[in-house]
Image: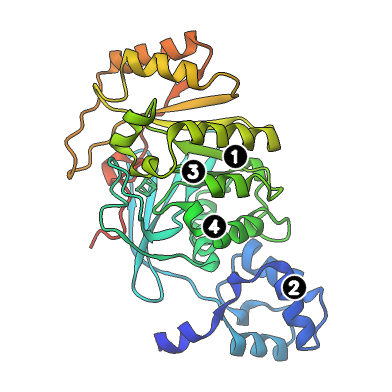
Amino acid sequence: MNNQLQQKEDIRNLSYEEVVQYLNKIQEKSFRATQIFEWIYQKNVWSFEQMKNLSKDLRERLMQDFILRPFEIAKKEISQDGTTKFLFELIDQEQVESVLIPTASRTTVCVSTQVGCKFGCKFCASGIGGWNRNLTTAEIVTQIMHVKDEAQKHAQPLSHIVFMGIGEPLDNYDNLVKAIRIINDKKAINIGARRITVSTCGVIPKILQLGQEGIQIELAISLHGYDNESRNVLMPVNKKYPFSDLIEACKQYQKNYRRQITFEYILIKDITCSTKALTSLKKSFKGLICKMNLIPYNPVSEFDHKTPTRQEMYQFRDQLKDFGIHATIRAPRGKDINSACGQLRRSIK
Ligand code: SF4
């Protein structure tokens, strides 16, 4: 059964233009593409049979040529703060996690892009088991459709997408960009580019490529170091794409889109939360419009880093503000269900 399904293309791998091309090839009218997109992405249906304004012949043809099915939800955990973590089982039995994060002002879904991760950042549970494969565009958008369903049940329409789940989004560039175009498309999920954030550990060539795509999404950089040496401690990617080149790439991205860049910065006692770090950050960020999300380190059992005290964290934030760097301490969400930043894993079997 699964082999049979795996041989068929998932229709959610197709862009709008590709659905139009397919329809033209089978002598159907192009406007059917809009109807198909609305059924899948706006009315959240999970089968072609439900697409009632399509002819029976077209529905049967779609069923013959494509699949459209939900994931198995292997596990769903709800945190005391309302954060909901999903463990989805994919068609080949691999598993990924997505997180629904409701707050008073927005409802965000944190999406995975790969099964595992190659980059092995030293604070992150997602990279511990290594990398297995990229997610397809369909697997990326299907996570969102499931979480959208859940959000709607609680009358909290999805407003923001962050690519901060398992995997390095820019290491799965083509599938990611295609998914972003579907998310952004008014006929599909219809979430504005400025409400979509891609977080990267710093894959410089792809940051530069993203800067040429013409989609003005938000860029977040997992910085977690204040110079080359300190970044090497937590971010092995820094050996290939060093700190100073990364900052230059951010400046280039900013020149293209005039968007503020967000730096994610984990506060680890005596490592990234220090006076030396403050001085260096001030120097590096000169000329860059940016904000810093300071993330108190979330314990991961495999690492022995420590979280700074509250006072140390507030002091660090205030001193950044004194330098003119807008900085906030991010309240950890879903910590009790291991869905806070850096805690997502390939599997919780
Ligand atoms: S932080 Fe991102 S890039 Fe680094 S190991 Fe975790 S998932 Fe991979």
Residue bearing mark 2? 33
Image point 28% across, 27% down: which residue? 268
* Circle 4: residue type: Tyr
State how far apart marks 3 and 2 are (Cα): 31 Å
Vertically, is 331 above or below 73?
above
Q: Residue furthest top?
A: 322
Residue position for label 1 = 218
Rendered view: 6 above or below 186: below
Q: Nearer the viewer, residue 141 or 316?
A: 316
Mark 4 sits on what residue?
173
Near mark 2 (Cα within 10 A), the count class, few <14, some 14-19 or many ≥20, is many
Q: Residue at x 64, y 33 (%)?
A: 254
Depth check, mark 2 against mark 4: the one in front is: 4
Q: Residues within 10 Å of mark 3 (few under 14, many from 20)?
A: many
In the image, which is nearer the foreground, mark 1 or mark 2? 1
Report, in whole angstroms, how far the alpha carbon at label 2 lies from the one at label 4.
25 Å
For residue 334, which quarter of the picture? top left
Tag 1: amino acid: Glu
In the rendered structure, which disc, 4 or 1, sits on the residue that comes first in sequence?
A: 4
Between discs 2 and 4, the one toward the N terminus: 2
